[in-house]
């Protein structure tokens, strides 16, 4: 049976600010809250990371830092998420050799998802499903059926992402996805908690 936890929240430029958005995620019991600040300086990321670390500390929400294992280590996050162009999982684990830390890996194709198995990440990201503007150089979109097929075939826990919102989440779950990420739907809302709960309710109808 696939490991099932639903919404994995990635925070990128939330209109309410990173700290308040993290608080909304904690209030909703979101299991993973990732900080992704692609164009920020290291100091800016570390500053926000410490705030999010304090919001999530002692809660059921695990704090993940995107891309940079040294920042994740510095703020004692719960894990790090690495892309295909970042350092290898093996190298990241050497830098942050602490039991219980989470190491996630992005994948954008069947081949990458298959190759990831030997690297033993704690989960893989699968996407983007739809075209998304949250990356300056976007990976080709997979589409619903292809992403669902990868999700069903991989033995690894997974999170599908890329253009997901309340209008298409049900279709994506029906195609085989179990866990998902919705960035713009939550980040662009002045009431992120409302959007989170809408998505969680849709997910609960199909998975629980």
Image (cartoon, grey):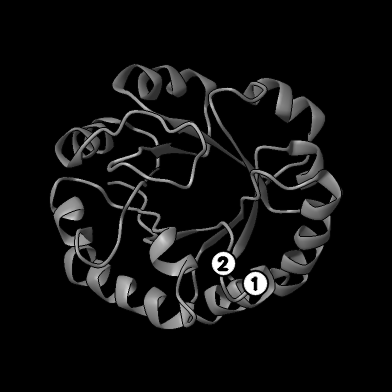
Q: From what the image shows, is residue 208 above or below residue 158? A: below
Q: Is residue 40 left or right of residue 155?
A: right
Label 2: element kind? loop
Q: From what the image shows, is residue 12 above or below residue 92? A: below
Q: From what the image shows, is residue 122 above or below residue 27? A: above
Identify the mark at residue 17; answer none if there is no mark: 1
Residue 63, x across and y down, in percent:
65, 58
**Residue underneath mark 2:** 14
Viewer-closest of 176 and 196: 196
Q: Is residue 35 left or right of residue 198?
A: right
Label pair 1/2, CB-CB below 8 angstroms: yes
Q: From what the image shows, is residue 80 above or below residue 146? A: below
Which residue is rendered at x = 58% and y = 22% of the image?
A: 85
Label 1: element kind? loop
Identify the mark at residue 186; answer none if there is no mark: none
**Residue 76 visible (yes or no):** no
Q: Is residue 77 left or right of residue 116?
A: right
Q: Quadrant of the C terminus?
A: bottom left
Viewer-closest of 77 and 182: 182
Viewer-closest of 75 and 13: 13
Q: Residues within 10 Å of mark 1 (few under 14, many from 20)?
A: some
Residue 170, x across and y down, in percent:
17, 61
Cα–Cα span, label 1 and label 2: 5 Å
Which residue is rendered at x = 40% and y = 74% of the image?
A: 196
Q: Is residue 89 left or right of residue 7?
A: right
Which residue is rendered at x = 76% and y = 62% of the image?
A: 48
Residue 12, x across and y down, in percent:
57, 56
For the image, the number of numbered tags is: 2
**Residue 69 visible (yes or no):** yes
């Amino acid at each position: 049976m696939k490991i099932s936890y639903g919404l994995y929240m990635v925070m990128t430029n939330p209109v309410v600010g990173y700290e308040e958005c993290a608080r909304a995620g904690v209030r909703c019991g979101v299991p993973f809250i990732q900080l992704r600040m692609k164009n920020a300086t290291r100091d800016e990321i570390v500053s926000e990371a410490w705030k999010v670390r304090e919001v999530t500390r002692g809660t059921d929400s695990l704090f993940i830092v995107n891309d940079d294992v040294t920042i994740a280590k510095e703020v004692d996050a719960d894990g790090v998420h690495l892309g295909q162009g970042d350092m290898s999982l093996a190298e990241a684990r050497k830098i942050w050799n602490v039991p219980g830390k989470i190491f996630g890996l992005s994948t954008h194709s069947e081949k990458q998802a298959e190759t990831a198995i030997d690297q033993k990440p704690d989960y893989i990201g699968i996407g983007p499903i739809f075209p998304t503007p949250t990356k300056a150089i976007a990976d080709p979109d997979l589409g619903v059926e292809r992403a669902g097929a990868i999700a069903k075939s991989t033995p690894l826990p997974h999170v599908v992402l890329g253009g997901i919102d309340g209008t298409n989440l049900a279709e994506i779950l029906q195609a085989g996805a179990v866990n998902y990420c919705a960035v713009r739907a939550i980040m662009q809302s002045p009431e992120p908690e409302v959007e989170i709960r809408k998505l969680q309710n849709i997910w609960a109808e199909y998975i629980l």
